[in-house]
Image (cartoon, rainbow, N blue to C red):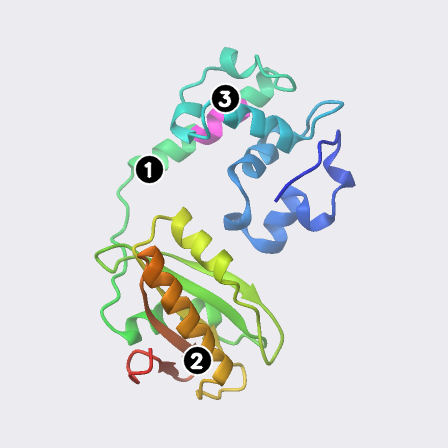
Amino acid sequence: MTYETSGTIQSWAEEDRPREKLMLKGKAALSEAELIAILINSGTVDLTAVDVAKIILKSVNNNLNDLARLSIKDLSKFRGIGEAKAISIIAALELGRRRKEQDRPQRARVTCSRDAYNEMIPHLIDKPHEEFWILLMNRANEILRPVQISAGGVSGTVADPKIIFKQAIEYLASSMILMHNHPSGNLTPSQADKDLTRKLKDAGRLLDIPVLDHLIFTDKAYYSFADEGIL
């Protein structure tokens, strides 16, 4: 997303403001610059908080590890960053470092379509509208994260291949499983479902990020393209 340089975030559309965006779309939808913008709260007369955050990130080649090495004095050299804002950034990065140090629970591993379905139950159960998700996995078929691609109406939602593979590349996924729900409870894939699956499978082959399965999720059961031999 490209932002015009502006002195105030309040002039942006509500869904583009970092705080509102987090509430509307969740924390994963925010860029690093937007997250830092929330920490520093305000920009300068001619720069938004996001603009200031982008300048700071650019100075460290967008490397959060290098950003964490900057001192209060280093950060205070940037226009719009005083001591209090510098401290907020450093405190947030220190919390992230300490979290990383703690033992991480073992990642769930997908060995069959049922594993993928069970992983998505908390995200898709009781949904009155269609949503499209992907499960991103590493080479050991351990789940890196589930990612929501879109949400739509009762009878459909959009799954943009560019967004899907952008997410997969961003999180260094080795493979993925596609997932969308049918609120009606109908497990039969539509022709559009089949065409999209074929398109994404072909794209995954070219990008070396194979699509391992596509599940149609309902509250009581699921349909697996791989299990049915039509992937």
Against 44, is 226 above or below? below
Q: Is residue 120 visible?
A: no
Q: Is residue 11 left or right of residue 160?
A: right
- Residue 228 location in percent, x, y? 30, 85
Disc 1 residue type? Lys
Chain-order first, disc 3 or disc 1? 3
The mark closer to the camera, 3 or 2, is 2
Chain-order first, disc 2 or disc 1? 1
Label 3, label 2: how many angstroms apart (C-alpha)? 46 Å
Label 3, label 1: how many angstroms apart (C-alpha)? 24 Å
- Reading the image, the residue beneath label 2 is 194
Q: Is residue 6 left or right of residue 184?
A: right
Against 162, is 103 above or below? above
Q: Secondary structure at mark 3?
A: helix
Q: What is the number of callouts on the image?
A: 3
Disc 3 residue type? Ser
- Residue 206 location in percent, x, y? 34, 59
- Residue 98 location in percent, x, y? 35, 33
Q: Secondary structure at mark 2?
A: helix
Q: Residue at x 56, y 69 (%)?
A: 158
Q: Residue at x 53, y 63 (%)?
A: 160
Disc 2 residue type? Lys
Disc 1 crowd, CA 10 A, few/some/many (<14, 14-19, 20+): few
- Reading the image, the residue beneath label 1 is 100
Q: Residue at x 59, y 16 (%)?
A: 78
Q: Is residue 29 left or right of residue 16?
A: left
- Which portion, as a residue range, is magenta? 87-93
The mark closer to the camera, 2 or 1, is 2
Q: Residue at x 78, y 40 (%)?
A: 11
- Reading the image, the residue beneath label 3 is 59
